[in-house]
Image: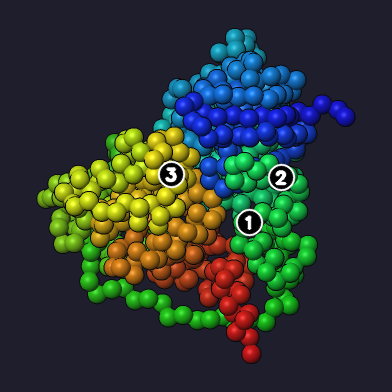
Amino acid sequence: MHEAILSLHGVTFAYRDSEILALRDVNLRIEEGQFVLVVGPSGSGKSTLLRTVNGLVPHFSGGRISGNVRVAGHDPIAEGPHAMSPMVGFVHQDPESQFVVDRVEDELAFAMENQGLPQALMQARIEEVLTQLNMTHLRQRRITTLSAGEKQRVAIGSVLTLQPQVLVLDEPTSQLDPQAAEEVLITCRQLNRDLGLTVVLSEHRLERVVQHADRVIYLPALDEPPASGKPREMLMQIPFAPPLVQLAKALHWEPIPLTIEAAQPFCTELQLRPVKRRSRQHPEATCIEVRDLWYDYHGIEALRGLNLRAGPGELIALMGRNGSGKTTLLKHLVGLLCPKRGEVRINGSDTRQVSIDALIEHVGYVPQDPSSLLFADTVRQELEFTRRAHGLPPVDTNLWLTRLGLAGLAERYPRALSVGERQRAALAAILVAEPSVLLLDEPTRGLDPGEKEALADFLRQQTTQGRTVVLATHDVELAAQAAQRVVILDRGRVLADGPAREVMSLSEEFSPQVSRLFRDPWLLTAQDVMEARSSES
């Protein structure tokens, strides 16, 4: 048998000071030129596995590793990340974390300068990568002025200049809007097909990427061996799948369609009577009121005359392209930013006239990076600290830990958890103060499909208790599952605002898979279709 481009034999790894194995006896073989998708539950070891490919595990992470890893004939365990960088290009979840300089062309040159390549060769490779990634017009731009999708392409370009044989990407679309995500994934697929580049990519939002993959590797819960195979074969075996595949499995469509186009012929056979539910009206009471809100960052307008009103018990999905103003709006609602013009009122109080400490008695905010809220020694202590900080009496923290699936992690160090686990820990630390308004910024980042479904159920339960939930998200499937109302922002203004079914069914960019298949506002999710089918006369 010929040598694979990437192989792992008997790889076992545990992080420093941890008795829990992050990888146990992993055996994998990836052939040159494959596009491989790595999936699995949150905390199953996906990021750890990817980091063994270039030696970040164990050289950067520390810990105990055994077994053999070979990439393009090299041993990353022995050689480390610097020596492996010409063979393996690694793109992190957060592209900004790997930028070193502030201008696009300089960032593309940095890795080559570190390798001591001649100036003429460096310039030729920069031109080649700029052309490959359609970034020529960005070469002189400051990275801080780029959109999230453009930053992701710069991160990819910065590793491609070394002409690696393997490109590894850890959840590359987790912070991208649907269009930017599709652009990045198409770019990766083109590099794979045109250059024969081996691509290994992890992702939770399977609906975005599964159609591009040649092979799927599934990492189950720890202590179980990985499984791998062709996408259709694996989607029949693993416990979660994109909505389109969920529907196909339930209705016994064969072969399983991976795209809307492939699913359309099956729809002609269905006779559906959609269950039409009355859209919830805006509550008469108001707990959030935003009037003519303007804000700019050093002259660049982020919000431009924005108006928004929300009442108790509403669950609002705030959507829009990267840079449309979602995070800026949330920061105004919690008092982290002060309006340049206009006003923001929470429960009748003008945010310019009350302190942040007074606001957070009513408003809980979970930012995109949950680690910024976590500093205690254990998850349980995070919740206990929140209660004390708000002057609240102690409660049984087990209740909140159980609700958010954290009971087994109660005594763990929060910053050592996976991204999805940290997200839930931060949410628990905020909710334990029982705020009347809950603001979530990209809450599904790092969450596996099962955790996402549980989160949607949990948030709906919160609204039944009168809590107002506003979540800024690029996850159209979460919005379709959970939101009563969708507000789409465009360049700092409200582009659309209404019932989720109406707004999402009319949007090309922010429409879920099932809606794009049936083009019916009453059919947003696979569950809607099954209910419509079961109600046939």
Residue 519 placement, left or right of 278: right
Where residue 453 appears, x then y in whole percent?
A: 50, 59
Q: Residue at x 45, y 61 (%)?
A: 456
Q: Nearer the viewer, residue 210 or 385?
A: 385
What residue is at 35 percent from the left and 38 percent from the top? 378
Q: From mark 2 to mark 1, how far is it between C-alphas?
A: 13 Å
Q: Is residue 105 above or below residue 506?
A: above
In the picture, the quarter occupied by the N terminus is top right
Looking at the rendered structure, the kind of residue marked 2 is: Ala
Image x and y of residue 537, in percent: 64, 90
Q: Which residue is mark 2?
A: 227
Q: Earlier in the sequence, mark 2 or mark 3?
A: 2
Seen from the viewer's position, the closer of residues 330 and 215 is 215
- Please provide percent x and percent y for residue 229: 76, 46
Q: Marks 1/3: CA distance?
A: 22 Å
Quarter of the image for residue 33 reads top right
Residue lying at the far left in this picture: please name it: 353
Q: How many labels were placed on the picture?
A: 3
- Label 3 CA crowd tier, 10 Å (few <14, some 14–19, many 20+): some
Q: Is residue 293 above or below residue 165?
A: below
- Residue 254 vertical position relative to residue 129 in the rendered view, above or below: below
Tag of residue 409: 3
Mark 2: secondary structure: strand
Amino acid type indicated by mark 3 = Leu
The residue singled out by tag 1 in the image is 239
